[in-house]
Amino acid sequence: MISLAIEDNKGLDISDIKKKKEEPSYTINTILELKKDNINELFFIMGDDSLFNIKSWYKYNNLIEESNFIIFPREKTLDISNYNQFISKELNADITKFNFIS
């Protein structure tokens, strides 16, 4: 399904890096492994519910440092001020690393 969605965009690629692993893998480890392949820019796509729970993720602060994010709202309305406040105050992160799609 993802292959079909990106087939016309030469700037996107799919990795099966997690599929090849036999043991469970944390997201930060996957990101760091992808960066070893000289990938210039990574975007981590997630729903806003995951963003608000990211502090429960393994080494979430390293994940924020190593990635750029694209956030999709799960609800129909998008109030960027809520996200900005959460990112800057709760995560103490650089807001420019986060992109919001409405």
Image (tube, helix red, strand yellow):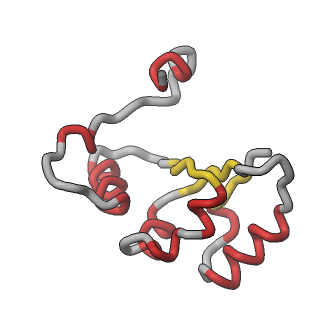
Q: Which residue is at the front of the view, 69 or 53?
A: 53
- Examine the rendered structure and indicate whether residue 5 appears above or below residue 36: above
- Examine the rendered structure and indicate whether residue 25 appears above or below residue 12: below
- Examine the rendered structure and indicate whether residue 51 appears above or below residue 31: below
- Examine the rendered structure and indicate whether residue 30 appears above or below residue 19: below
Q: Position of residue 46 (x, y in %)?
A: 57, 51
Q: Quadrant of the C terminus?
A: top right
Q: Is residue 10 left or right of residue 48?
A: left
Q: Which residue is at the front of the view, 16 or 95?
A: 16
Q: Quadrant of residue 8?
A: top right
Q: How many marks?
A: 0
Q: Position of residue 101 (x, y in %)?
A: 74, 46
Residue shown at 48%/26% (left/top)?
2
Q: Position of residue 57 (x, y in %)?
A: 43, 70
Q: Is residue 84 left or right of residue 52?
A: right
Q: Quadrant of residue 15?
A: top left
